[in-house]
Image (cartoon, grey):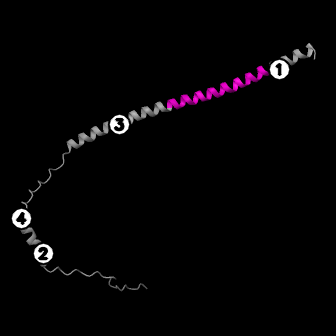
Amino acid sequence: MDNGQLLPLLGGFLAGGLLAAGGVNAWLSGRAKRVAQRHLQAEQALQLAGQQLTQARKQIEQLQRENHELRLAVRPAPRMPVPAPEAPQDPAEAARLYAESKLQPQPAKEQPQAFKDTVVLRRSE
């Protein structure tokens, strides 16, 4: 190979390498722009969600304040006074009453019926 062929060959390789590097650079820069744009959109969405959360919390606080004011405005009716508890019963008297209740005959329980009474229905013609 002489210098007349070597110089154009190296120039072609160099030009091809520069062209390939330029293509890769363009492709990567476009991809980097898309990634940066997605990152920016995600950041904006996060910021919007934070603002909405803050607004929702303020609304909840306001509704709780209004609810509290309404509860104070509409007071419930006074409750019936609780009757005083009865005096404790003598254990001997309680035992006597229990024994008497057991000695008394139990009322007859109604026997459950297995089937309902038959009802004759009219035939429709």
Query: Which tag is nearer the camera, tag 3 or tag 1?
Result: 1
User: Residue 50 at what x, y percent from top left?
Assistant: 43, 32
Q: Label 3: few (<14), some or many (≥20) within 10 Å?
A: few
Q: Label 4: few (<14), some or many (≥20) within 10 Å?
A: few
Mark 4 and mark 2 in contact? Answer it, CB < 8 Å.
no
Q: Give the residue at mark 4.
A: 90
Q: Secondary structure at mark 1?
A: helix
Cα gap from disc 4 to disc 3, whole angstroms:
60 Å
Circle count: 4
Q: Residue at x 32, y 84 (%)?
A: 117
Q: Give the residue at mark 1.
A: 13
**What amino acid does circle 3 point to?**
Gln
Residues in magenta, as a range: 16-44
Q: Quadrant of the N terminus?
A: top right
Cα gap from disc 4 to disc 1, whole angstroms:
116 Å
Q: Residue at x 84, y 16 (%)?
A: 11
**What amino acid does circle 1 point to?**
Phe
Q: Give the residue at mark 2.
A: 101
Query: Which tag is nearer the camera, tag 4 or tag 3?
Result: 4
Mark sitting earlier along the chain (4/1): 1
Query: Which tag is nearer the camera, tag 2 or tag 3?
Result: 2
Q: Give the residue at mark 3.
A: 59
Mark sitting earlier along the chain (3/1): 1
